[in-house]
Image (spheres, rainbow, N blue to C red):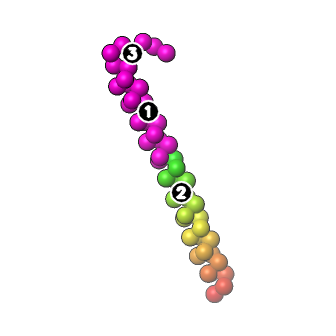
């Protein structure tokens, strides 16, 4: 790891926050995808029953 000197806490904090935000975006995308797939399955089931 390179020597970051006096800015090490700021740089590592920024990396940490960035990784947390990216993980949040991925989790939110997966959650929305599952929710939309379930709604689509319900709509397709209703269409088949009509």
Residue linked to disc 2? 31
Report the magenta residues as a range: 1-25
Q: For the residues marked 3 and 1, what is the alpha-carbon distance in whole angstroms?
A: 15 Å
Residue denoted by label 3? 4
Give the SS element for disc 1.
Answer: helix
Q: Residues within 10 Å of mark 3 (few under 14, many from 20)?
A: few
Element under disc 3: loop
Q: Is residue 38 left or right of residue 20?
A: right
Residue denoted by label 1: 16
Establish if 10 lies above or below 5. Answer: below
12 magenta-colored: yes
Tell me, yes or no, whether the two marked residues, 1 and 2, touch with CB atoms within 8 Å. no
Q: Residue furthest left?
A: 6
Q: Position of residue 50 (x, y in %)?
A: 63, 87
* Disc 3 from disc 2: Cα separation: 37 Å
Q: Earlier in the sequence, mark 3 or mark 1?
A: 3
Q: Residue at x 46, y 40 (%)?
A: 20
* First of labels 3, 2 by sequence position: 3
Circle 1 crowding by C-alpha within 10 Å: few under 14, some 14–19, many from 20: few
Q: Position of residue 46 (x, y in %)?
A: 62, 81
Relative side of 33 to 12, left or right: right
């Amino acid at each position: 790891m390179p020597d970051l000197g006096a800015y090490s806490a700021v740089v590592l904090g920024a990396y940490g926050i960035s990784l947390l935000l990216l993980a949040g975006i991925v989790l939110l995308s997966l959650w929305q995808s599952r929710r939309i797939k379930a709604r689509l399955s319900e709509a397709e089931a209703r269409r088949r029953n009509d």
